[in-house]
Image (cartoon, rainbow, N blue to C red):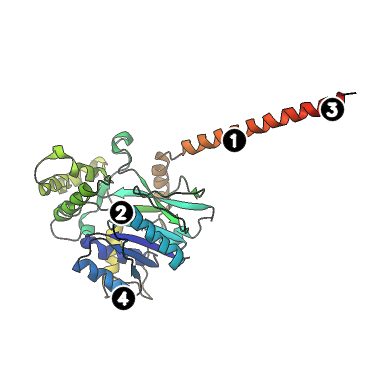
Amino acid sequence: MILVLSLVVSDDADVLDAHIAYHLNAGVDLVLAAPLRPSEEVDEILGAYEREGFLRKIPAPEGADDARVRTSLARVAADEVGAEWLIDSGTDEFWLPRGESLKDVLAPIPPRYGLVQALVRVFLPRPDDGPAFYERMTVRRAPGSVDDEAMGRLEWALRPVYRVRPDLVLGLDREATLDGRVPLRAWYPIELLRFPLRTAEQAQRRAARERATGIAVRSKVEQALLEPEQGGPLQHRVGQLAVSDTELEEGLARGTLVEDTRLRDALRRIERDGPSRGFGLPTEGFALELHPPTIVEDVAYAVECAALREVDFEPLVARIAELEQRIGSLESRFWPRVRRAVSRLLSP
């Protein structure tokens, strides 16, 4: 199977190299990248992977919005690459399989399922004291530490991975038209690790983009950044949102925060043991070795998944109404036929 990752690249050069290197080492065969705001640093990173054949730059259609650009990348994955699965990603998103690789968890999915969903994990800002984001940002909120109503669908959310079809259309909310395809429910073989606010400078760029485009924020921490009542310079607000060492220690003790070092450990291994070219281009003889979860970890994860209570009631109600209508139509045609047949039998 061929697994493709599509990426609309803006100006997040601070995370781009780690993002591409991680996914190529985690099972992605090819990255399709559409640069929207090219810079010298972004071009240098993309060019290094393109020269090695791991990435293709796809020009974004002139004047196209985000959804059209991502849909055009999906069409390239289907028509030109022949991909079976597509991960439609943001540069701050790292897709972590609950298995040895992304292919390892996607390959066994039966063909009837056209959609697999990932459980989103949003990592909180930490003081920007020099190290790379993945060295600093290893903390997220513990499941259930905030009630579902307050959290809404921002941080407690699911994101899809698509089985590729030529007619795949991606929307602004990163949902896709299913056209009868069945999504895999109640079990999420991939976790999506998001790092939305990494530095004050990067947060300022993100805030400016989101205000300009009007696209809804994807996490509570981003929502807090953009709330006008917060006031004060943006750099000050980022500092207020960052989890201090004291807050981290107290949160871990209360069970409201979780220390999650899986991405940090994976990227450390790529940097330490991977090839010297770029951040870590995949080469023969090097394996990232993402370890499947233990039975205890799987049980805890199953409890989290059960808390989502993911049931599509609206499609079920629509399907029931459709069946009732068809039954009513059959009954309206059946009984007149019976009456006519009985009348013929009884007539002299």
Would you place residue 326 above or below residue 259 in this image? above
Q: Label 2, label 1: how many angstroms apart (C-alpha)?
A: 39 Å
Q: Mark 2 or mark 3: which is in front?
A: 3
Task: Decide which of tag 2 and tag 1 comes sooner along the chain.
Answer: 2
Task: Decide which of tag 3 and tag 4 comes sooner along the chain.
Answer: 4
Q: Which residue is mark 1?
A: 323
Residue 129 vs residue 172, the one in the foreground? 172
Q: Label 2, label 3: how many angstroms apart (C-alpha)?
A: 67 Å
SS class, disc 2: loop
When asked about the image quadrant of residue 45, the answer is: bottom left
> Which labelled disc corresponds to residue 344?
3
> Residues at badges 2 and 3 in contact (C-beta under 8 Å)?
no
> Residues at badges 4 and 1 in contact (C-beta under 8 Å)?
no
The residue lying at 51 percent from left, 34 percent from top is 317
Q: Within 10 angstroms of label 3, few (less than 14), some, or many (20 or more) residues?
A: few
Q: Give the residue type that dot 4 points to.
A: Arg
Q: Position of residue 331 (x, y in %)?
A: 68, 30
SS class, disc 3: helix
Q: Mark 4 or mark 1: which is in front?
A: 1
Task: Decide which of tag 4 and tag 1 comes sooner along the chain.
Answer: 4
Q: Which residue is mark 4?
A: 51
